[in-house]
Amino acid sequence: MSLLNQPLDPDDAAALDELQSFRQSIDNIDAALIHLLAERFKATQKVGELKAAHGLPAADPERERRQITRLKALAESASLDPVFAEKWFNFVVAEVIHHHERIASGEEA
């Protein structure tokens, strides 16, 4: 049931205003994250092209391990669940490796 379809007492109206404010902040953060991911993928695209040009493998497990360690520490210091940070990183890296493999095979430029 939506609170918007019924008369609101002042406390509920204030809560809805606060909720809208929080949601606007979340929307702004989501937009910033999309732009940051786009910039990240532009950089990883260049990495993939460089790797392909020099016959380097798409994945770099040692670097990935170092990054996971670094990002989990950053997550902890930011009060973010480090397990979530690792899952996010693994998801992104899997997509990057997929792109690198496509670049190396000539499917993507």
Image: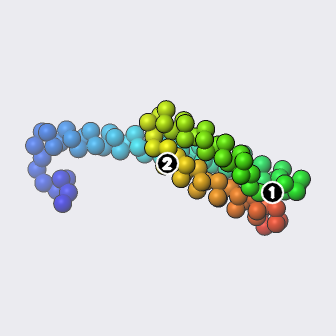
Left or right: where does residue 60 sit relative to residue 83? right
What x and y, as percent, mark residue 57? 81, 57
Tell me the tag on residue 70.
Answer: none
What x and y, as percent, mark residue 76? 48, 36
The residue type indicated by label 1 comes to: Pro
Q: Closest to the observer: 61 or 6?
A: 61
Q: Residues within 10 Å of mark 1 (few under 14, many from 20)?
A: few
Tell me the tag on residue 83.
Answer: 2
The residue type indicated by label 2 comes to: Val
What x and y, as percent, mark residue 61? 71, 52
| Residue 31 can be seen, yes or no | no
**Quarter of the image containing the C terminus?**
bottom right
| Callout 1 secondary element | loop
Q: Closest to the observer: 68 or 5?
A: 68
Residue drawn at (82%, 62%) of the image: 104
**Quarter of the image containing the N terminus?**
bottom left
* Res. 106 image quadrant: bottom right
| Callout 2 secondary element | helix
What x and y, as percent, mark residue 31? 50, 45
Q: Earlier in the sequence, mark 1 or mark 2?
A: 1
Q: Which residue is mark 1?
A: 57
